[in-house]
Image: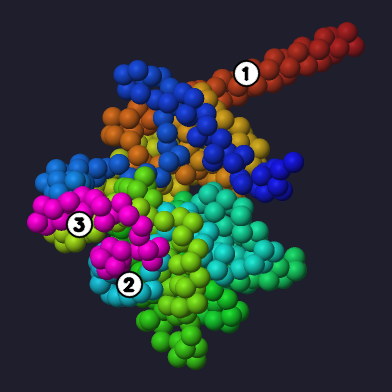
Amino acid sequence: MLSSKASCNSHGQDSSYFLGWQVYEKNPFDEVENPAEIIQMGLAENQLSFDLVESWLRKNPDAMGLKNKDGESVFRDLALFQDYHGMPAFKNELVEYMAKIRGNKVKFDPKNLVLAAGATSANETLIFCLADPGEAILLPTPYYPGFDRDLRWRTGVEIVPIHCSSSNGFRISMHALEEAYERARKLDLKVKGVLITNPSNPLGTTMTKDELQNLITFAIDKNIHLISDEVFSGTVFDSPCFISIIEAAIDSNLKRNTDVLSRIHIVYSLSKDLGLPGFRVGMIYSNNQTVVAAATKMSSFGLVSSQTQYLLTCMLANKKFTSKYMKENQKRLKRRKELLVSGLKKSGINCLKSNAGLFCWVDMRHLLSSNTFEAETDLWKKILCEVGLNISPGSSCHCSEPGWFRVCFANMNQPTLEVALRRIKDFVERSRFNCQQNMGGFSRRLLSNWVRKLSSADHREEQER
């Protein structure tokens, strides 16, 4: 009675990434009401600088009240129909903000910007523009679990993983790119592009200029598109600095292919950098005018409200505020990340070295009962149900090595993070103690068996004498 889309299970909702959320939502932690329940560490949300945004709002009540500089109401204008191209003033401020994050090393043309209801909508729209059902996009692992939904579910496009490993810090190698491309060909899949996240989700690392230029060269050689999801570009809090794919393309001087920029596309949003995921503000930036035209038409299915555009236009136009916010937010992210890393280290748990994002890529391989994804799932269930922490297992991110987990640190206050770290420490100590007890019991059994065998041998020898 229903469509195949409604009845299929390709959405990815059964992933441990989403299942952990469901368990958390039934038993959410609260410092006062539910201090023993589950702490959400699987949500990449930035709550560390809310006070800065709220302070600006208090100082600019007219923006919240939908009034212009003269104190006159603009409610009627905003409440009426708005063109789906977006408000020109908002797009102008967005491209300036994007350039500012990138150190003004690149400039963006507002005419090449398409608004969307968040990065989720932007990524799906872009895939609709670039590929047909049954064609493929290459994606380096580990990758954001939501991409299985965003890129595949409604588009019918296949994801072919580019397998990266811990041996080089999960960096994308040319060998891995070629291997993924050949694997797609053997599966009779036409590859239409490569999608990267820079800074990486879940790794929290930025890509080097060499990596980016290798990707550009690969895209040129294969005559495919290159999509860079840069939603975490404003969260870079440590060196090396962030390099946008556009900057790398301009610096590469690849004169042998003049249309390379027309096959490079950026996805961005204000969800992570400004901590406004509920405002649903995403965008596509492309120099390909056919893509811009098609994406703009599709954007009518996921518009950003005119009231939201107006408020954020006022906020982003305040350059003093955006400068202060960016610097302070990055400082706070760095301090919070260091708190998580140091706390985990005290428990004997290490993290991949990172310089961006709202999470750490945490190495718990030594806590596995065996080097398998089944053991990783067992460990994840213990941490979720017994320790009371919702973290994302590497398998949900399609990591090729069991034992890695994404742990978020910016969606809670510091006291809550400290509770989480104490819980982890207690869990590791209990696990170590139980292991020692089991080993002790095992040793005692061996000794007992040995004594029995020795006694029996002595008894036989005595009888023989």
Name the image quarter holding residue 179. Answer: bottom right
Secondary element type, mark 1: helix
Q: Secondary structure at mark 3?
A: helix
Residue 197 location in percent, x, y? 46, 60
- Residue 314 has which mark? 3
Q: Quadrant of the C terminus?
A: top right
Please give the count of numbered marks on the rendered protein: 3
Residue under the point 62% across and 39% down: 14
Query: Dot 2, crowdedness within 10 Å: few (<14), some or many (≥20)?
Result: some
Residue furthest to the right:
464
Label 3 with label 1: CB-CB less than 8 Å: no
Give the labeled residue for mark 2.
110
The residue to which callout 1 is attached is 441
Residue 142 vertical placement versus 449 (above, below): below
For the point 61% across and 71% down, the residue is 192
Q: Quadrant of the image for the N terminus?
A: top right
Q: Does the magenta-highlighted stretch encompass residue 346?
A: no
Amino acid type at mark 1: Gly
Q: Who comes first in sequence, dot 3 or dot 1?
A: 3
Residue range in magenta is 66-95
